[in-house]
């Protein structure tokens, strides 16, 4: 399916605004239990909870490094009285409950959670049940670097630092270089991804988070964090696939393909197709965490309404990233 060179913005409301959030390096937080070691091994433990931050506009001074995208907000929306914009509304996270950590107090290991609520129960491994699959569309993949903390520092409640690039890692005394065959450096920072997805409502699910109707399907926005093995199997896999397979023809304002000699000109489109993600347990040293597996649905392309929405969302993320860079 082709994409026009200039898409019309979705008529479903104003464009989402964007906020930023990143924990300070070495910040100690008040936690009821030690850091979730299984989640840390899986690479799915985010640097810090999605805490409230103020909305960022194009003329605001951005002071943090990673982006979070808020739901639709408008101070002039009829029916909403008061200073609603002082209470940022964050997109929810999607995650799987690992074998330890605070979430085990509310959910069983293997539960897939979306917006703090159960989306899928754990599969019964004894009965050889297949892992649950989620269908999603990637909208934005933000590369970050996460500090690898020792067990002692994690047990003390310290949160890992998050850096937007290798230069920031080096300014914090870290390195992203781990020579093959050598022990892990004490100051190593690993690549991590903050993924913005549109999740398609699973068949038969009555979860309230799928409130958007696009091209006849219900979707919900979700943030997914991935580092370590999860990074390689999710955001890195999607990025590598996009370099070779996620291209669409460029269409001019008259609906005619733009040609490059005898062949149509094409451009990359991250959200060209749907994907599936599922989690299964794998042995990793002394732990058996759940790790993701993503697969491209090559024959399930996105429709024009969904692509227009994704483009608007993507442009807002790019705007706040540029504002953050200009403020440094």
Image: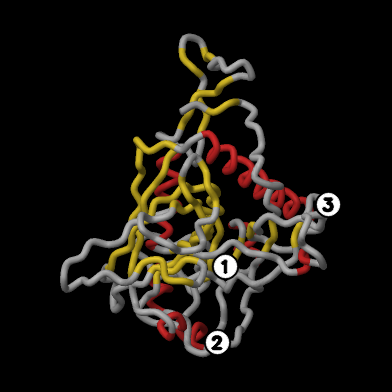
Q: Is residue 18 above or below residue 271?
A: below
In the depicted view, which residue is nearer to us: 91 or 263?
Answer: 91
> Gap in Å between the C-alphas at discs 1 and 2?
25 Å
Give residue 312's position: percent from left, percent from top: 64, 42
| Residue drawn at point x = 62 percent, y = 78 percent | 26
The image quadrant that residue 296 belongs to is top left
Whether residues under marks 2 and 3 lie with C-beta atoms below 8 angstroms apart, the answer is: no
The image quadrant that residue 253 belongs to is top right
> Mark 3 = which residue?
59
Label 2: few (<14), some (14–19) or many (≥20) C-alpha neighbours in 10 Å: few
Q: Is residue 87 above or below residue 5?
A: below
Give residue 30's position: percent from left, percent from top: 59, 87
| Residue drawn at point x = 36 percent, y = 58 percent | 204
Label 1: few (<14), some (14–19) or many (≥20) C-alpha neighbours in 10 Å: some
Q: Earlier along the polypeptide chain: callout 1 or callout 2?
A: 2
> Gap in Å between the C-alphas at discs 1 and 3?
32 Å
- As drawn, the residue found furthest toward the front would be 79
Residue 255 visible in the snapshot: yes
> Mark 2 = which residue?
31
Query: Which numbered tag is attached to residue 174?
Result: 1
Q: Nearer the viewer, mark 1 or mark 3?
A: 3
In the depicted view, which residue is nearer to us: 14 or 208?
Answer: 208
Answer with left or right where residue 241 lies relative to residue 16: left
In the depicted view, which residue is nearer to us: 240 or 84?
Answer: 84
Q: Quadrant of the C terminus?
A: bottom right
The image quadrant that residue 179 belongs to is bottom left
| Residue drawn at point x = 36 percent, y = 51 percent | 276
Secondary structure at badge 3 equals: loop
Give residue 89's position: percent from left, percent from top: 66, 64
> Gap in Å between the C-alphas at discs 2 and 3?
36 Å
């Amino acid at each position: 399916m082709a994409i026009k060179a200039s898409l019309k913005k979705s008529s479903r409301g104003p464009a989402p605004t964007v906020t930023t959030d990143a924990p300070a390096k070495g910040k100690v937080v008040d936690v009821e239990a030690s850091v979730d070691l299984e989640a840390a091994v899986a690479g799915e433990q985010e640097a810090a909870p999605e805490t409230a931050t103020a909305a960022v506009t194009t003329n605001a001074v951005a002071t943090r490094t990673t982006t979070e995208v808020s739901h639709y907000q408008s101070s002039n929306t009829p029916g909403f009285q008061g200073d609603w914009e002082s209470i940022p509304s964050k997109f929810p996270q999607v995650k799987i409950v690992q074998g330890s950590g605070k979430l085990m107090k509310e959910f069983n290991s293997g539960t897939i959670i979306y917006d703090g609520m159960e989306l899928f129960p754990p599969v019964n491994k004894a009965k050889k049940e297949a892992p649950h699959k989620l269908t999603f569309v990637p909208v934005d993949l933000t590369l970050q670097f996460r500090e690898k903390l020792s067990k002692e520092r994690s047990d003390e409640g310290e949160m890992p630092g998050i850096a937007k690039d290798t230069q920031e890692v080096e300014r914090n005394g870290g390195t992203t270089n781990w020579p093959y065959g050598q022990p892990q450096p004490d100051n190593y920072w690993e690549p991590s991804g903050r993924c913005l997805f549109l999740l398609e409502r699973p068949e038969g699910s009555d979860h309230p988070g799928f409130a958007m109707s696009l091209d006849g399907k219900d979707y919900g926005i979700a943030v997914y964090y991935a580092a370590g093995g999860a990074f390689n199997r999710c955001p890195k896999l999607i990025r590598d696939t996009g370099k070779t397979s996620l291209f669409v023809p460029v269409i001019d304002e008259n609906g005619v393909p733009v040609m490059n000699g005898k062949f149509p000109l094409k451009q990359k489109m991250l959200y060209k197709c749907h994907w599936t993600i599922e989690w299964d347990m794998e042995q990793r040293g002394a732990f058996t965490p759940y790790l993701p597996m993503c697969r491209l649905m090559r024959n399930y392309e996105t429709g024009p309404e969904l692509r227009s929405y994704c483009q608007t969302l993507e442009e807002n993320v790019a705007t706040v990233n540029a504002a953050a860079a200009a403020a440094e």
